[in-house]
Image (spheres, rainbow, N blue to C red):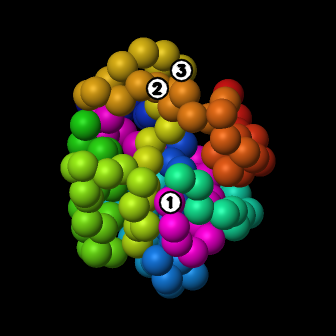
Amino acid sequence: SAQHLIMNRFYILVGSNIEPDINVKIGLDLIEESTEINLEAASTLYTSKAVGMDGDDFFNQALRCTTDRSFKETLSLLKAIEATCGRERDPNNKFTPRTLDLDIIHWNDFDGVMEGYKLPDPDIKKYDYISVPLAEIFQD
């Protein structure tokens, strides 16, 4: 009998302020090409001023996706896509310009901490650059 797969619905916040027009497009293409993630919807692309750092404007976009993979597997996949776009993390400073950020900000109806990540991301309530694109495509 066919194994029943649990389908997880989750939301990604895409962010970039280094060649964002190129990097956001590459990130989206890689997500669309991946066999593990099904992209259901993408919000409008928004630009916003860099907050807490010197740098060019940020491009942000929210994506609604489904996957039959676990949170941890999905996270690993997104980190690999970030790395493909040349993302370098500075452990001493989270406020640095970035080629591509793919953050899981919402996972099913989960509320709590998963793999060290607080979900839903508390920043959703604090920042328009997250809440506005998310509201555009959010479905319960």
| Badge 2 element | strand
Of marks 2 and 3, which one's residue comes earlier in the chain?
3
Pointer 3 and pointer 1: residues touching (CB < 8 Å)? Answer: no
Report x, y in % for residue 115.
26, 28
Residue sitting at x 36%, y 19%? 113
Q: State the CA–CA distance, disc 2 to disc 3.
A: 9 Å
9 versus 26 height, above or below = above
Report x, y in % for residue 12.
51, 48
Alpha-carbon neighbours of circle 1 within 10 Å: few (<14), some, or many (≥20)? few
Residue sitting at x 55%, y 27%? 122
Report x, y in % for residue 14.
52, 58
The quadrant holding residue 78 is: bottom left
Kind of residue indicated by mark 2: Leu
Of marks 3 and 1, which one's residue comes earlier in the chain?
1
136 versus 119 height, above or below = below
Q: State the CA–CA distance, disc 3 to disc 1.
A: 32 Å
Image quarter (top left, top right, bottom left or bottom right) of the N terminus: top left
Q: Give the numbered dot on residue 53.
A: 1
Between 140 and 86, the one nearer to me in the picture: 86
| Badge nearest the viewer, 2 or 3 | 2
Of marks 1 and 2, which one's residue comes earlier in the chain?
1
63 versus 25 height, above or below = above
Residue sitting at x 36%, y 50%? 94
Specify the segment rendered in magenta: 53-71
Between 4 and 23, the one nearer to me in the picture: 23
Kind of residue indicated by mark 3: Asp
Residue occupied by mark 2: 119
